[in-house]
Amino acid sequence: MHDIKANLHPCAHCSGIGTCKNGQEEQSCAVCVKGSELEGKVFVGLPCSICGGIGQAEPKTERINKRMPALLGFAVVFLLITFVFIAALTSSKYFSEILAFAGTLIGTVLGFYYSARARAT
C-alpha cells in the first residue's frame, strides 16, 4: 500500500513502557480502564490507551494531517455525486454543465488516488 513513515515519540502517559500506572498506588488510570472496556474494579497492568501498549505514540496532529487528504477527497466525491443526483431528480436545466464539472472533478480525484504515482510516494 502506501509507505507511510510515522514519527513516534516516547509516550508521556506511560513513560514509554506501554503499561499504565497513572492511577492510585500504580494502578491503571480511569482512561485506560475505559479504553480496555472494563469497569467497576481496580486494575493493574493494563495496556496504555494512548499508545496502544507499545510505549511509542504518534502526535495527534500528525495523524490528522496524514488522514485529511483522503477524507477531503472522499467528501468532495460524495458531495459531487449527491449534487448530480439532486440535479437529475429536479430536472435542472443546467444538468449537462453540472455533470461535466462533476465528472471531471471526480475523475481527477479518483485518478490521483488510484494512480501508480500516488502509491509510489
Image: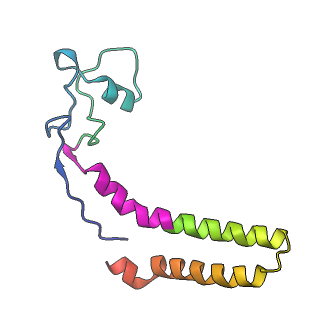
Could you tell me what secondary structure mostly forms the magenta stretch? helix
State the residue in front, 5 or 93.
93
Q: Quadrant of the N terminus?
A: bottom left
* Colour mode of the rendering: rainbow
Which quarter of the picture shows residue 120?
bottom left
State the residue in front, 80 or 18.
80
Q: Residue at x 21, y 15 (%)?
A: 24
Whole-percent x, y for residue 50 in the image? 28, 39
Whole-percent x, y for residue 40 in the image? 39, 14
Which quarter of the picture shows residue 48?
top left
Q: Is residue 70 magenta?
A: yes
Q: Residue at x 81, y 73 (%)?
A: 88
96 left or right of 102 in image: right
Q: Residue at x 32, y 23 (%)?
A: 30
Report the residue that reaches farthest toward the front.
93
Q: Is residue 31 magenta?
A: no
Q: Which residues are magenta?
A: 54-72
Exactly how many numbered labels are in the figure? 0
90 left or right of 97 in image: right
Q: Residue at x 27, y 29 (%)?
A: 46
The image shows residue 84, relative to residue 116, as above or below, that is above
State the residue in front, 74 or 95.
95
Whole-percent x, y for residue 95 in the image? 77, 79
98 left or right of 49 in image: right
Q: Quadrant of the C terminus?
A: bottom left
The image shows residue 110, relative to residue 50, as above or below, that is below
Whole-percent x, y for residue 99 in the image? 71, 81
The image shows residue 21, relative to residue 109, as above or below, that is above
Report the residue that reaches farthest toward the right.
91
